[in-house]
Image (cartoon, helix red, strand yellow):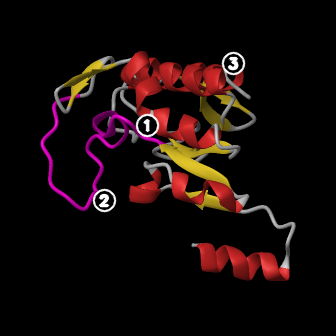
Amino acid sequence: MRRAISAIRAIDPDRDLVLNGFNGGDEAIPELADTGAMHSGRGYAPFTISHYKTEFLWFEYDWPEPAWPCIFEGRLWDRDMLKENYRPWLEVEEMGVEIMMNEIGSYNKTPNDVVLRWISDLLDVYREFKWGYALWNFKGPYGLVEHSKPGARYENIDGFNVDRVLLELLQKNKV
């Protein structure tokens, strides 16, 4: 990564750079805090909520239907655990690095009421940390529009079927 950053900086010293975390974006990279690049993580913890019944995972699993708060890997996951989960990112931020969570959301097989409780806590943590974030997609299974999560209620806005409650959560927690 350092060689790539150096090559880019040689051509365009003022170019904004974003480094994705390790392990699919989940793990902070304190070793690269001195590069001048923003660091980008993911908002998929716990994975049993964000990736419930996805067809594209590289491993087999048999997870129970998600709940929030929940037990994951033998620990209670709630708002406090979300904060603890992002401690390594806070430590990188304390080194002077800008942080954003560049990909968040939950697949459309997780019941909408669970997603809304979970993402409400997740976004509240990001707002507290003053971190920007982005949904995995605008329209589709991880998005705000026509995601088809069980129990979702939509409102037609400019021709789009929008999850109004999720939209309001996103607006309330903008940074």
Q: Which residue is mark 1?
A: 148
Q: Nearer the viewer, mark 2 or mark 1?
A: 2
Q: CA distance from mark 2 to mark 3?
A: 32 Å
Front-lying residue, 35 or 170: 35
First of labels 2, 1 by sequence position: 2
Front: mark 2 or 3: 3
Q: Looking at the image, is 97 positioned above or below residue 3? A: above
Q: What secondary structure is the stretch in magenta mostly built from?
A: loop
| Disc assigned to residue 56 | 2
Q: Which residue is mark 3?
A: 172
Residue occupying the point 28% across, 55% down: 55
Which residue occupies the foreground of this view, 20 or 108?
20
For label 2, the SS is loop
User: How far across and down, in percent of the image, does residue 145 sit?
Assistant: 58, 38
Q: Amino acid at mark 2?
A: Phe
Q: CA distance from mark 2 to mark 1?
A: 17 Å
What's the magenta region?
A: 43-65
Q: Position of residue 90 (x, y in %)?
A: 56, 35
